Image: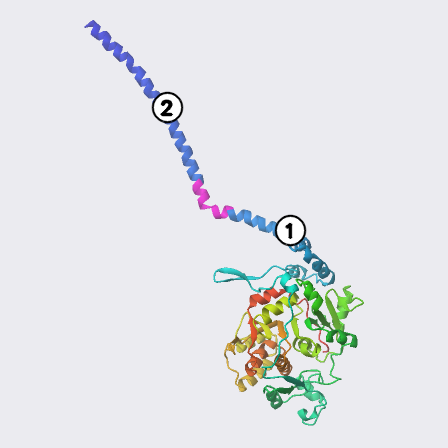
Amino acid sequence: MFNNNSISISVSDDEPDELGRMRVRVRRKRKKTGHRLKNEFLHRVVRKLVRYWALLIFLPALGLLLYEASRIGRKPSSVANTELGASEKSTLVDSELSNVTNPSLEKKSNGNLNRLDATTRVVGGVRQRCLKILSPEELEHLEIPVREEANSPVSKVLYISENDTPFLGGNSTLSQEHTDATRFNLFTGSQTLDQRSKTFKVNETVSMNCGFYSENGGFKISNEDKDYMQSCKVVVSTCAFGGGDDLYQPIGMSEASLRMVCYVAFWDEVTLSSQESAEHRIDGYGFIGKWRIVVVRDLPFADQRLNGKIPKMLAHRLFPHAKYSIWVDSKSQFRRDPLGVLEALLWRSNSVLAISEHGARSSIYDEAKAVVKKNKAKPEEVEVQLSQYRHDGLPEDKRFNGKKALAEASVIVREHTSLTNMFMCLWFNEVVRFTSRDQLSFPYVLWRLKVLKNINMFPVCTRKDLVNSMGHIRKAKPLRS
């Protein structure tokens, strides 16, 4: 019995060791619980990151954007120099020397000035350039094509002058009362509605008013400038009358274009004075940078917008030996190679006239409402024009001859053929007769002159690739009140 008791005692003595080992195990389990708490904390952090990841990305991006904006605002010229290649920096220097800056609009203008980056758009899911222009190497070997007008319905255009009295009913004298009422004057010549209608008839030889009617009609140019203009075969032109806009140097041209293309800017004496006061003077050869400055005296219209239509629409009269011309509004900086533009917009598509589609509207009647709403013309003037067009049968179609009816004419690229010359004369006469808003008269002339079919109405993005839009700097001063 005693031995058995001692054995039982010895067995019970072993129990604390087992409990001790169990307590050790419990302590180890507590360590694992702490590890689990740490994992839960990490999971909580990850959930927060997942929930607010957009905010964490946005805040650094916003800070970077603000930093870049402040850097560009401080050093616009240095940023522009960095983005331009070495071959283009000389053009930038010329531009900075000859562009006049308006302090109130300097920041706005600097954003676009001297940009050469391509404008692109997505076509079929693929991003493409809006204007596919030849490489500089190809442009160096590009030859200007000689195209015959054998199949043209119009082979010759005769321009009416003050000596052609039969067309004016035997009276070549324009009364002051008549010119004040209709804006016709000694520069334009007079034209009745019946005579206007006859000018739209297509014949092998056509006669029409097309400005420069009388020696006393104004728009006087020096003989030296005339000689230069007569030497031009390809011309890029612009104008600034009334001191309205600055002169932006063309950029992006090839060596071939520098040799073969004339760059001509028409100024009046008001613009000349304002430019000289800003220390931008014509050099001894008649140039400012790339532009040959032609100073026009005795402008024929009180409305500077009408005076601007003369170089815009009548390039074939100002440059009688030029085969091609590109018009650029003074609010824009031309930034592409002229020969490349002619190849891309005319020769490649066998077109004789290229002009941009209107970006906002397609109907002449919608455009008329916008013109009145924006105070671009008097409501009564617009109504007279639209009434005449309705009377003549102009439909409300948004497309004529397969082309979009409404154009934006800040860039005009054309070949000087008899038919395109006739078109531009008709367009100019409509602008003189009615409002100076040429968007309203372009669809009408396109509709009436149905034989002019090979027109390239290029998209808005192509126009944006051709020029850097700077906007009008200041309002042009009227010739007289």
User: For this rendering, which residue is in front, 206 or 399?
Assistant: 206
User: For this rendering, which residue is in front, 236 or 35?
Assistant: 236
Q: Is residue 340 left or right of residue 57?
A: right
Q: Is mark 1 on a helix, strand or loop?
A: helix
> Circle 1 sits on which residue?
71
Above or below 1: residue 370: below
Q: Which of marks 2 and 1 is nearer the N terminus?
A: 2
Q: What stretch is highlighted in magenta?
A: 46-56
Q: How far apart are marks 2 and 1 (CA)?
A: 62 Å
Kind of residue indicated by mark 1: Arg
User: For this rendering, which residue is in front, 395 or 31?
Assistant: 395
Above or below 65: residue 447: below
**Magenta span contains residue 50:** yes
Q: Which residue is situated farthest in the bottom direction here?
A: 170
> Circle 2 sits on which residue?
27
Nearer the observer: mark 2 or 1; the answer is 1
Q: What element carries label 2?
A: helix
User: For this rendering, which residue is in front, 43 or 374?
Assistant: 43
Q: Is residue 313 left or right of residue 274?
A: left
Q: Which residue is situated farthest in the top direction here?
A: 2
